[in-house]
Image (cartoon, rainbow, N blue to C red):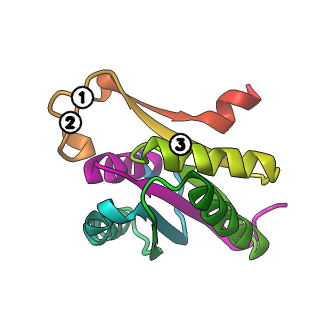
């Protein structure tokens, strides 16, 4: 399905709010994505970071000249099946509304990432992008994207890599 409404971005928040925000910034800068909707999916123990991540996404987005609608979805901790079902349902709803969907797994915890990717794969949902901001070193990376040397960062789109 070709997106009618534009793009939606689902991002998984784990322990690092910086990782989530920096991956989002990298996607805007390097890939030119301008999502109309952003959903932050996190687990209960990390939910306190979601409002900060939401504010940061808004600030970064406004720097690129747009303002997405931002939502937060909180899941129980370490519930592989529920995480997969929730993210699959969210992606299906967005695609059904006509959005192209991108998922960022950079900050997500293993349980949430695995649950999401397995559920999406089994349901054969067409996700346009699966982003991951890889870092060669984790030393001194808890700061804004533009302050981290770009030679240690590599934004990967797993869907592009699979199609290549």
Please indicate whether residue 47 sits to the left or right of residue 158 in the image. left
Query: Which structural element holds mark 3?
Result: strand
Residue 110's place in the image compared with 123, above or below, is: above
Q: CA distance from mark 2 to mark 3?
A: 18 Å
Decide whether residue 37 is among the magenta residues: no
Query: Which structural element holds mark 2?
Result: loop
- In this figure, which residue is indicated by the disc labeled 3? 131
Decide whether residue 4 is among the magenta residues: yes
Using a 10 Å C-alpha cutoff, classify the residue at mark 1 as few (fewer than 14 neighbours), some (14 to 19) or many (20 or more): few
Q: CA distance from mark 2 to mark 1?
A: 6 Å
Between 7 and 159, the one nearer to me in the picture: 159
Q: Which residues are magenta?
A: 1-27
Task: Locate residue 120, reporting x and y percent.
Answer: 72, 51
Location of residue 46 by image quarter: bottom left
Task: Locate residue 128, reporting x and y percent.
Answer: 69, 50
Q: CA distance from mark 3 to mark 1?
A: 18 Å
Query: Which structural element holds mark 1?
Result: loop
Question: Which quadrant is the C terminus positioned in?
Answer: top right
Name which residue lies at 64% across and 68% down: 90
First in residue order: circle 2 vs circle 3 = 3
First in residue order: circle 3 vs circle 1 = 3
Using a 10 Å C-alpha cutoff, classify the residue at mark 2 as few (fewer than 14 neighbours), some (14 to 19) or many (20 or more): some
Please indicate whether residue 36 sits to the left or right of residue 59 in the image. right
Please indicate whether residue 116 sits to the left or right of residue 66 in the image. right
Task: Locate residue 113, reporting x and y percent.
Answer: 53, 46
Question: Which quadrant is the N terminus positioned in?
Answer: bottom right
Name which residue lies at 52% across and 56% down: 79
- In this figure, which residue is indicated by the disc labeled 1? 138
- In this figure, which residue is indicated by the disc labeled 2? 141
């Amino acid at each position: 399905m070709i997106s009618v409404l534009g793009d939606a971005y689902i991002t998984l928040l784990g322990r690092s709010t910086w990782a989530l925000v920096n991956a989002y910034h990298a996607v805007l800068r390097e890939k030119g994505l301008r999502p109309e909707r952003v959903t932050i999916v996190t687990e209960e123990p990390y939910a306190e970071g979601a409002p900060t991540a939401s504010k940061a996404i808004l600030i970064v987005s406004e720097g690129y000249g747009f303002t997405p609608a931002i939502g937060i979805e909180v899941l129980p901790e370490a519930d592989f099946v529920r995480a997969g079902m929730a993210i699959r349902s969210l992606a299906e709803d967005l695609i059904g509304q006509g959005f192209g969907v991108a998922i960022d797994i950079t900050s997500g915890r293993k349980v949430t990432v695995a649950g999401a990717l397995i559920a999406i794969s089994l349901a054969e949902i067409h996700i346009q992008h699966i982003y991951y901001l890889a870092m060669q070193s984790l030393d001194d990376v808890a700061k804004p994207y533009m302050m981290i040397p770009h030679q240690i960062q590599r934004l990967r789109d797993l869907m592009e890599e699979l199609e290549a």
